[in-house]
Image: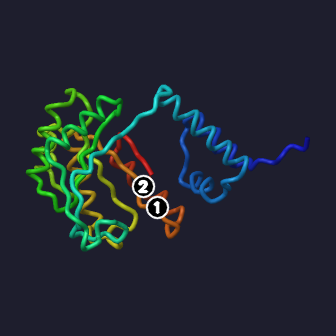
Amino acid sequence: MKRLPIDERVQDILARAADCTGLTTEDALYLMDNVDVNSLEMALLCATADRLTREQTGNIGEVFAQVGVNYNHCPLKCQFCVFTIEDLPRMELADDEVVARAVKFAEEGANAVSLMVTADYPFERFLELGRRTRAKLPPEWPLVANYGDFGPEQARDLLEAGFTAVYHVIRLGEGVDTPIPIQQRIRTLRAAREVGLDVTYCLEPIGPEHSNRELLHAIQRGEEFTPTSMAT
């Protein structure tokens, strides 16, 4: 059988990745630009990523659960968000229902639960939900705040209410497709880290309009806040 050729640079990059010696920006871009989805190189890349992930996590996956507390039109009107629709029906879960769902997630094996609200949700009410939820969860169980932007004082309030982490992101298109300045998002992330809240980060919302270099820049920017987890 004829041996199929494999890109030698891809092999070299993945060998260094497997040895945890680190990748340069250009290495990462080369993989993104040159590895076809239906190729041997992609199979090798996936196998390397799979091995490294299993080694890092002890072969144990995690489940992050989320409770959507309310559902209604959001005044920020980020262009990629369903909550821009003006005539959305208003819905909000009762406090007991929020707590019950969080507890059920914990009982069924989730590793963390997030409480998510729209940007106009009252902060004090969100804190109260956090306190009530924390009171029913195991003391060290991760409780994540998926809230809008805030400063140092509010970050301390979240910590005291029982939250252990925040989900917060500088989105792709921030300040262009959204009305939120990037510096405002950075301020929130720094405030969270400074009081000891973990950060859960994400590369989002990915679309065909984003170049590979733009995606990589967004990943590297997220790494600046030493996230506990990073998703796409």
Mark identifier at residue 98:
none
- From the image, which quarter does the N terminus lie in? top right
- The amino acid type found where label 1 is placed reads Ile
- Comparing 91 with 130, the one in front is 91
Q: In the orientation shown, which residue stands out farthest toward the right?
A: 1
For label 1, count other residues whose C-alpha is less than 10 Å away and answer few (under 14), some (14-19) or many (20+): few
Determine whether, in the image, residue 72 is placed left or right of residue 61: left
Spot occupied by residue 3 in the image (x, y as percentages of width and height): 86, 43
Spot occupied by residue 194 in the image (x, y as percentages of width and height): 21, 44
User: At 22% from the left edge and 59% from the top edge, which residue is drawn?
Assistant: 118
- Comparing 193 with 87, the one in front is 87
Q: How is the image coloured?
A: rainbow
User: At 45% from the left edge and 32% from the top edge, which residue is drawn?
Assistant: 61
- Judge whether 62 appears above or below 221 on screen: above
- The answer to whether marks 2 and 1 mark residues whose Cβ atoms lie closer than 8 Å is yes
Mark identifier at residue 203:
2
- Comparing 220 with 158, the one in front is 158
Determine whether, in the image, residue 228 is placed left or right of residue 15: left
- Judge whether 26 appears above or below 80 on screen: above
Mark 2, secondary structure of its residue: loop
User: At 8% from the left edge and 51% from the top edge, which residue is drawn?
Assistant: 124
For label 2, count other residues whose C-alpha is less than 10 Å away and answer few (under 14), some (14-19) or many (20+): some
Asked which quadrant contains residue 84, the reply is bottom left
Q: How many numbered marks appear?
A: 2
Asked which quadrant contains residue 22, the reply is top right
Spot occupied by residue 50 in the image (x, y as percentages of width and height): 57, 36
Spot occupied by residue 159 in the image (x, y as percentages of width and height): 16, 40
Which residue, given by chain and number where applicable, does mark 1 sit on?
Answer: 206
- Comparing 117 with 188, the one in front is 117
Determine whether, in the image, residue 111 is placed left or right of residue 125: right
- Judge whether 164 appears above or below 9 on screen: above
- The amino acid type found where label 2 is placed reads Leu
